Amino acid sequence: MPRILYDPLPSTSIAILDYLLAALGGETYYPLGGNTGLPAGALESLDHNVVLAATPINVRVFDQALLRSAAHRDTVLVRHGFHPETLDPVRVDVVLRSTTGPILMPDLAFFRDTGGQLHLVPQHDRLFLTVGPDGIWVSLVAPFNHWTDRSVGLEKAAAEIIRACAHARTGM
């Protein structure tokens, strides 16, 4: 998988984007040019029909830009703060394209199941997303059986993110 570097991005944003890119796979990611309203360094995958972006801004200020972007592709924005999963929670806002209009799914969390698959899960039962080589898939069925399983998967993903960001900052 290619490592994509952008000067304006903090190392934590690069680490988070790399984390998502590793789950998606594929080789073709392009910088999203133009004035989209999304954070700098947003990427577009033609293979998966998705736009990916990451920002240290914790509050939801990009909702309108996400909705505009979803007119063409599903859009994923990771809000990670300056200390992802240690002091700042990592939250993912996803907008899915649909025939009835865009569907905004805010404040999702990364979840790693026992089989190693990456998911995005809401705080309560709703729609669940799977991130993999086939793109982003929606499911009504949770990737966990019990709330304790949910906690384990959330902790596993959080630990992976902490390690990835620490490695990006220190190189170790």
Image: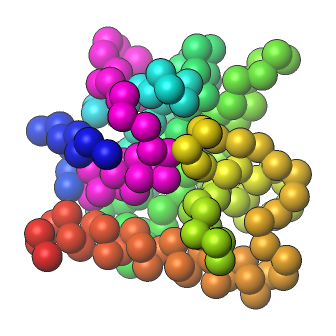
**Which of the image's four quarters has the C terminus?**
bottom left
Image-based side of 84 in relation to 11, left or right: right
| Magenta residues, start to end | 12-39
Q: Is residue 17 at all visible to an observer of this figure?
A: yes
**Image position of 105 with respect to 30: above or below:** below
**Image position of 87 with respect to 59: above or below:** below
Residue 97 falls inside the magenta stretch: no
- Residue 120 is drawn in which quadrant? bottom right
Q: Is residue 66 at all visible to an observer of this figure?
A: no
Image-based side of 108 in relation to 53, left or right: right
- Residue 88 is drawn in which quadrant? bottom left
Q: Position of residue 13 (x, y in %)?
A: 30, 51
**Image position of 43 with respect to 112: above or below:** above
Q: How many marks?
A: 0
Image-based side of 168 in relation to 50, left or right: left
Q: Nearer the viewer, residue 21 or 34?
A: 21
Instruction: Residue at 45% x, 44% y: name it.
Output: 25
Q: Position of residue 125 (x, y in %)?
A: 85, 61
Q: Nearer the viewer, residue 3 or 73?
A: 3
Instruction: Residue at 62% x, 14% y: name it.
Output: 71
Instruction: Residue at 45% x, 27% y: name it.
Output: 45
Image-based side of 128 in relation to 93, left or right: right
Q: Position of residue 105 (x, y in %)?
A: 70, 43
**Image position of 38 with respect to 33: above or below:** below
Q: Position of residue 94 (x, y in %)?
A: 61, 40
Instruction: Residue at 50% x, 26% y: name it.
Output: 47
